[in-house]
Amino acid sequence: MINGLTRIAFAGALAGAMAASGSAAAQDVKIGALFPMTGDLQAYGGSSANGIRLAVEEINAASGVLGEELAFAIGDTQTTPQAGVDAANKLVSIENVAGIVGAMSSGVSIPVARSVSSQKGVPQISNASTSPVITDLDDNGYMFRTVPSDALQGIVLGNLAYDEGYRTVSVVYVNNAYGEGLANEFTKQFEKRGGKVAASLPYEKGKASYRGELGQAAKGGAEALALIGYPENGTTILRQALEEGHFNKFIFTDGMKAPEVAKNIGGGYLDDAIGTAPSAPEGTMAKEHFGNAYEAKFGELPPKPFIDTAYDAVYLLALAMEKAGSTDGEAIRDALNEVANPPGMKVGPGEFAKAKDAIANGEDVNYEGVAGSLDFDGNGDVPGTFEVWSFDGADIETIKMVESEL
């Protein structure tokens, strides 16, 4: 870790992390990643970084980008806005990255987009930030995401809770853009279906006790608790909810989809819980390629979100650079819409060489990712598929897939 940055370079096959005194070759094309290697979302940082590593390895096996090796550096956001902005500034000013993947937390991505990427002209693709606020962000067109908005997940979650038979629930959500946005969207849809939200309460990260919030949430006779949060503090909330006898039925979102949650609670207490998360469509060649390639490189693919969307973001940035013929930020920004959307020859994971040849021959390409269609709209948003999931002991199992709809 160098001033919050982990610097990694690739030459042909994937190489290990460079020594603290090392640096990528001056001619390398470089991208940055803003990931929570520490903090509330650290359960997802390392696995998402592996998604980037895999994409970079495949791209370099196809002779890299613009004739050069592709390198990347990771900035640790610590899941806090200021640390994220500081890391983003270092990626841009010191590492000279041509694009950024991340951040993961919406509460970090939004200030980074406002004060760094949009101001310094560096395209930013979040693989995990789902807040509806991002849709209308004043970002000069530099903010994109490979994960669908919570305006969509909230509908899926509200329908799921109602269809599971719940008629009164309480919501406890992390007090940031992600938590507030998804809580609002869930409430709208659940009440539209005829349900009642007895209480909707924010929680602050880093507290030792959430018994006060849980006591308030339990007053309205709720049958279940919808917890919109992150593993570190979410585990504390769950444990205290069970200890106090306030709740034993839970509804989760993508932020809590981590095996660590069930392992830390133990005893099968969460086996009846249900949740939603953005997910890759089932049965596609893209998903099969990604799964096989990941397992060959890193072992079993964790049942966590945002690994595939990080991988897709790297492919999109690399293809946009090829399309633009440049690492200029404005040119990459404009080319992202061209390589992600129809018309054009469809290309997917593992097909970077094919895509490069098509671009070199003056053809249009349309990248279809592991996460599905990544057709950016005018706000940099994408459609999406959602997974309904549950815990089975310390494992996570998929119950069904749901297409998003507005």
Image (tube, rainbow, N blue to C red):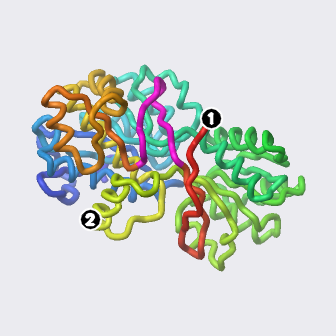
**Residue at point 45% right, 33% down?**
112
Q: Is label 2 or label 1 in front?
A: 1
Amino acid beneath label 2: Lys
Q: Secondary structure at mark 1?
A: loop
**Residue 338, image x, y percentages:** 32, 27
At label 1, counting other C-alpha atoms closer than 10 Å, the crowd grade (few under 14, some 14-19, many 20 or more) is few
Is 324 on the left-hand or right-hand side of 154? left
Residue that badge 1 annotates: 406
Is 179 on the left-hand or right-hand side of 351? right
Q: Secondary structure at mark 2?
A: helix
Task: Estimate the spatial distance between the alpha carbons at disc 2 and disc 1, rounded to whole Å.
Answer: 38 Å
**Residue 86, image x, y percentages:** 40, 37
Extreme residue in the bottom direction: 267
- Region rendered in magenta: 371-385
Q: Would you say residue 81 is visible in this rendering?
A: no
What secondary structure is the magenta-colored segment mainly?
loop
Q: Nearer the viewer, residue 135 or 26?
A: 135
Magenta-span inclusion, residue 384:
yes
Amino acid beneath label 1: Leu
Is 274 on the left-hand or right-hand side of 128? right
CB within 8 Å, label 2 to label 1: no
Residue that badge 2 annotates: 297
Residue 324 occupies quadrant: top left
